[in-house]
Amino acid sequence: MAVRRQRHHVAVVCLLLCCVTPAVPIPDPRHREALMQLEASMQTGGQVVPSEAEQRLDARLRKLKEEEMARADFPPAMHFFKARHLIRNSPIYSLLQKMPKGSCDAHTQSCFNCKISNHRFVSGGVLHVHDFSMVEVEWLVRNVTYRPHCYMCLTDDQSIRFLFSSSCPKPLPHCSPWTLLENLRAKMVNTTDLDNSIMGNLTLFTEQDPEAAYPSQDVVWKKFERAFLVMWGLVTHAPVFRDYYYQGLAQFYMDNVMYLELRALLPETYELDGSTHDRAWTLKTYQEITRQFVAEHPDFFGARIIVTAHRGLNASMVTAAVEEAMKLQRDFPEIMAGFDLVGREDNGRSLWYFREALSLPAERGVTLPFFFHAGETDLQGTEVDQNLLDALLFNTSRIGHGFALLRHPVAKDLSRKGGVAVEVCPISNQVLKLVTDLRNHPAAVLMSEGHPLVISSDDPAMFGASGLSYDFYEAFVGFGGMSSNIGSLKQLAMNSIRYSSLSPEQQEKAMVMWQRKWDKFVSENSF
Amino acid sequence: MAVRRQRHHVAVVCLLLCCVTPAVPIPDPRHREALMQLEASMQTGGQVVPSEAEQRLDARLRKLKEEEMARADFPPAMHFFKARHLIRNSPIYSLLQKMPKGSCDAHTQSCFNCKISNHRFVSGGVLHVHDFSMVEVEWLVRNVTYRPHCYMCLTDDQSIRFLFSSSCPKPLPHCSPWTLLENLRAKMVNTTDLDNSIMGNLTLFTEQDPEAAYPSQDVVWKKFERAFLVMWGLVTHAPVFRDYYYQGLAQFYMDNVMYLELRALLPETYELDGSTHDRAWTLKTYQEITRQFVAEHPDFFGARIIVTAHRGLNASMVTAAVEEAMKLQRDFPEIMAGFDLVGREDNGRSLWYFREALSLPAERGVTLPFFFHAGETDLQGTEVDQNLLDALLFNTSRIGHGFALLRHPVAKDLSRKGGVAVEVCPISNQVLKLVTDLRNHPAAVLMSEGHPLVISSDDPAMFGASGLSYDFYEAFVGFGGMSSNIGSLKQLAMNSIRYSSLSPEQQEKAMVMWQRKWDKFVSENSF
């Protein structure tokens, strides 16, 4: 790692000085400068000493950021749905897309016959992404729903369901009779409206006013969960499942993410004749596709799976899920990273409720790393708000979201001292209505204190985003303001490897790969 | 002070335990409980050991808060303009109105012949309120503009100006000819529309959608500053000035605030014949009215003035203002608390820009306490964002707003260790568009860490609020969620005395007065 500690000594001396000596009425400019430097050295990346080329790139980024901050419509202050086109046209965003971002934690789906035409700028990693929201929904509509044998029905509550079948399937309860999409489209002069309507059912993104469309957390979560049901019949069809995951890897790779950790529900998948594959098949398929993708893209490092269960399940079902996860961890150690509980924390059961199930691995002396979602809530002081502390007590390897962490000084201290990184998902927290102006996101504070954290995209397809660069933009421009710099970006990218589930040897290897990409990125863009 | 440290020992032992021992895979429920108690003990008021009566009141508050948090329309998550009627009807708000809140820091104006009919529940203090926004604007319209000799003109930019004069005044530039309001109203069948229109010019409050009315910080600040210009001609008329301030004290007194520190621009005032009084007259008048009010209301403790200059002034003007403030501090030590700079930080000059002026008192060995506004910004990393550190380096007694403090770990540490309290103004920060959902206000974090802070109302009349109880509601229900309790309320009230500019002897006296009121409040409401 090209990170040196030159400033560290100055910082310590200065900390002693300024905490012991009371503030003097006439400030000494050198003392003031030392305190400002101390603060700068504390932030994420504050210990990075930039090379000359990095300094040139930093100056360029600084200038671009000054222009961006002078805008009346400052993107991080706006809802992402309204800001997306501004971000897309921002020169900072273009640079961030090219930047090797390390790894990424994602929730995803799969792809077939994907051709990747442009991978000049391949990069870093993402550690918090979910299985069925990796791929832009346009691909699902334009590619998957146009495949043969795709049936659709309309539910009583104005939603839709899909199923692939070699013959007309039995009707679903509360759904219209199945229609073969191929036949339906053949009767239409123009299928654009139909396709747009399908697309609208698969994502939260809307061109309408997002505040009006989603006035409350309850409304936005309802639509969010419903979109997963719409997607389910498409992405659990075995051939689609493989393709979706491949396409997901491709989209992150295109966004210069070189490693991925995916929260995956591990669904059973089905074939055209209605036969099914079990969850082990699904995990094995993740492993096979990952190997295939790495073989075809040697500068992609890989992906690992965090198996998830829904926190709406009851205690015995979660016990069964933990037992199965221990078995899968033993049988597929290469691909499987650990276990997590997913779904809206405010509505679901708390980690403490599941304490018996979650104690099983330790009781049996079996290794099952946890990667718990915790603190994705603003219900301060309630039972669910204790998930943060409980995640740490159950020795979680990272904290998913940790939006409420600042309000829990004890948990925050445990997280920092234990090196338990927070997976920060800015756009997700905004779209799901935890925060409006992203400058107020708690991670702005965590970054100013150099708390261990990584930037992730959670469910990019659901939010009309893709890959990781939009979230990196929000973090770099929104959280950091003029304080964040090339050091922050470098540290965030390195964090995504350092706090991954990879073994120390694998991390070392990944870091070498990333450093090569980083140096190339810097040299190509520092003019 | 009835604050004991019973939990402190447990907390220290536990802190050592949990920071030294790594988290164990199977959490021990006693360890978990100890950590939760540790966190509870760290928050504002976490060291308060409640009496039996306080515990009963706490249980009542807890139940009420649970009901409030279950609402779909949770007031702290909403814009205050939309939430005001909900808060007004909340039983928690009723209790907070009755509660002795200690002191309050306010910006205000004055009253004459004010009758106070109901002061059963008189109380605590407010430390950050501005001179010309103390009194609900309805009083200005219904009382002041109905006085004789009140002229009004319409400005080119759709605003209005007022002037009291015994004869028709000379026209103002960019304003219509003056109209005597008495004559204008005499010609009208119904003056309601006129009065409502005047009222709309004196406050930011609107029944319309606040997001549409004030789409940006620039827009809301423009209207904010314009409203002060409208008010200026009314409140700087010497007789009105006296009445306005008296009325201001009365309104805070009615809201159970027993002590006030007022940011005051100290305008020259004028008589009907156009003759004027200088700024010393204004300060002397504050002193006289305060003495009169205290004499008439022996359970009101008093008020002090923080003299302010606008940060838009140039360096030599601020130098002159500091020199005058030193003189006033010497001549009026009873009423004058210190000095501050006001106006929008983002547009004004930084404290560091004025460093020579601000160094004068120390250079001359003269006492002039500073109470700087700092960190009322979200422009992180810019020059203005250094005001927080500079305020502390200039030995500020408190920090006005400190909205950005969390993002400055060095300044935050200096503030905490130096006992420099943050004057938190929740509704102000929301209306002036620093934060949307008040649960995300940085003071929620400061409270969770027990950082020194007081709750204030800034410019209540401008925001359609009054007194201090609305802001206490937002802090208690919004910042704290289910975590805050009777101890938090008690500590916040006591903080407003402890962090006031009063001498230790005066503080002791004020604390005795407050404690008597508090005990009465608790005994009357703990059923």
Image: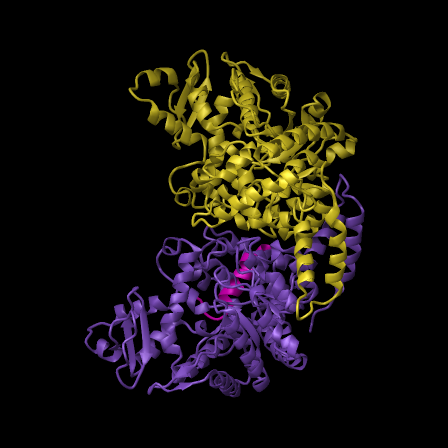
Chain colours: A purple, B yellow
Extent of the magenta region:
A465-482
- Residue located at (62% from left, 59% from top): A447
Q: Position of residue B291 (x, y in %)?
A: 64, 18
Residue B78 seen: yes
Residue A110 occupies quadrant:
bottom left
Q: Nearer the viewer, residue B83 or A341?
A: A341
Above or below B63: residue B240: above
In reply to whether residue A63 is colored magenta, the answer given is no
Q: Position of residue B187 (x, y in %)?
A: 30, 17
Q: Nearer the viewer, residue B286 or B249?
A: B249
Q: Main secondary structure of the magenta part?
A: helix
Q: Nearer the viewer, residue B189 or B4?
A: B4
Is B113 on the left-hand or right-hand side of B168?
right
Q: Considering the image in quadrants, where does the C terminus of chain B appear? A: top right
Residue B322 occupies quadrant:
top right
Q: Position of residue A372 (x, y in %)?
A: 57, 68
